[in-house]
Amino acid sequence: MTSKDIRKSYVNFFINRGHQEIAAAKLVSENDPTTLFTSSGMQPLIPYLLGQAHPDGKRLVNSQPSFRAGDIEEVGDNRHTTFFEMLGNWSLGDYFKKEQLPWIFEFVSKELGLDEKRIHVSVFEGNDSISRDTESEEIWKSLGLPKGRIHFYDVRKNWWSKSGTPDQMPVGEIGGTCSEIFYEFPQMVHNPQFGDKCHPNCDCGRFLEIGNSVFIEYKKVGDGEFEKLSQKNVDFGGGLERLTAATNDSPDIFEIDLFQDIAKVVEQITGKNYSEDKTSFRVITDHLRAATFIILDGIIPSNKLQGYILRRLLRRSAIKLRDLSGQIKDLSKVAVQVLAVFDGLFGIDKKSQTELINKVINNEMNQFGKTLEKGLKEIEKITEISGKKAFDLYQTYGFPYEVTEEIFRTKGQDIDREQYRTEFEKHRELSRTASVGMFKGGLGGHSPTEIKYHTATHLLHQALRDVLGPEVFQKGSNINEDRLRFDFSFNRKMTEGEIKKAEEIINERIKQDLTVDRHFMSLPAAQKMNAIGLFIGKYEKEVSIYAIGPNFKLDSDAKDQRDRGSYYSAEFCGGPHVEHTGVIGKVKITKEEAISAGVRRIRAEIVLN
């Protein structure tokens, strides 16, 4: 069976049992500040597991694209990925173990046709706080599983909560025991490095976890103390890739259709076959699947948060591509094939999104390629790696720590991570000191590109007030080398016309090459000229105002008609800014969205004319 067949079969199986199919959440988490990415189908449903009514009812099903950054270093064997599809079904206070376990067993054994004699399951062995799960044990026995294929595990292997094991859970968090399903591949010989005895949770590769039914019914109320929730929930998650591999009787998930069509492009680019270097092929195909979805959610490579993870994925893939072919070109072709594989699913449209994928990946590879060869030559000179040398490679050649770590791991050497961190912090402190002594006026620590974005943010702020009205005020902003992010007060979604108008105003002010002046004045004087500033109470007696556009004539149709004298924008700010707007370049608004009640967010970037 193909992955497409299994995805469809699974969703229909649970629809026929009263479930409503729900849309998948975005891969980049939007409403969960505790995590960067959606890591399971359950993650967006936590409020409903706690008792809030879901608009689509108590029985839900879907397939959720998921990403787990913690697995990046694990990718390379026959079963670990960072990006995967999680097939999920949920009961929100409706059915429980006696319905869930027979259903999921019926699906894998009857619908998928897996050999029942090779199916193993886990149940909770019990501890001082929570009883042994004899109910699940008896259900599995009634389904025909013998005692030898029902395995009891403690909370380290058989417990789910957002934070981990019960002792790691904060008070108030929910969790519960689970029952995993494993499929055995007898052709895989047990690797003794994982211990004398092979068992489903062994990690040697003989057993593959294909699904997990989590029974969320507890809330932590104290140290080792739990109470029952007002409702019992079921949260099942099954990896589509692993289920497909099991159905095809292959212990190597990278041999299924979802990967092989992508791997064929890698073969074309490199002239190598998958069998010649499986590790490199696995890293490239997995990482480019993840990178593609992350880019489509509006992230570009950077040194922070999701952008840093994206950069790691692309640069690690580039190193593996170079291992295969001696060069890093054409990496974007692999991502375009990812679009083809998922075309029509999860909002992916290959025709319209190819240009974006090519642009983001090629830009990153051009940037990385300039320093890669020099860096690799330097690495060849290093006989023994240290944390300091690893930092020097990062500082001089832009090598992420993880890339350097991987290169030297193949040489049998480990890096002192603490020494690396010490060097990093030492450099940061030197930069901070230098900025105080050498760059008066806030220029320290900001690149020329970031300074352009800072001024563009002022132009955007005023343009939004001109288009939407004086009720618009900045609520927050974030700037890096690649984009600006601007949060503002407004109570509805902007229309396409309003977005276009704001963008046109910004670019017109840039085209006019308005001067940017800094003025120091008393707080009353700044207030008299109507300079924008929401936090008046925190300012000193003398304040810094950046004003854009002396002798500027205000548009007659602007909604914000404050008396700003001859300036287009006047705003409380400590800098830094460009000296005149013409150096910024063209600004493109890429996204406008809600982030909370009454607060919107705009993302924009400087693009080539």
Image: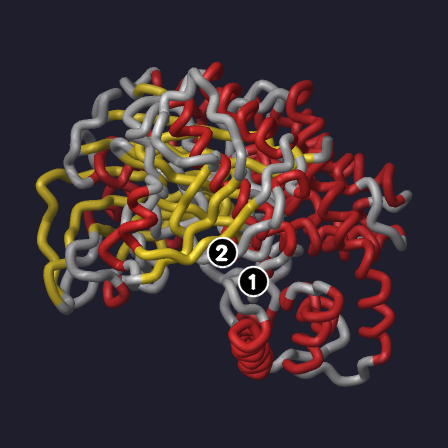
Q: Is residue 193 left or right of residue 155?
A: right
Which residue is drawn at the image coordinates 42% and 46% (left, top)?
477
Which residue is denoted by mark 2 in the rendering? 575
Q: Estimate the spatial distance between the alpha carbons at disc 1 and disc 2, rounded to whole Å.
A: 7 Å
- Amino acid beneath label 1: Leu
Can I make out residue 553 in this image?
Answer: yes
Which quadrant of the structure image shows residue 12?
top left
- Few, some or many residues within 10 Å of mark 2 (<14, 14–19, 20+): some
Which residue is denoted by mark 1 in the rendering? 443
Which residue is drawn at the image coordinates 31% and 19% (left, top)?
20
1 and 2 marks in contact (CB < 8 Å): yes
Q: Secondary structure at mark 2?
A: loop
Quadrant showing the N terminus: top right
Q: Is residue 396 above or below residue 459?
A: below
Can I make out residue 249 in this image?
Answer: no
- Amino acid beneath label 2: Gly
Which residue is drawn at the image coordinates 81% and 84% (left, top)?
383
299 or 608, which lies in front? 608
Q: Residue 148: horizontal and vertical position, in percent?
A: 39, 54
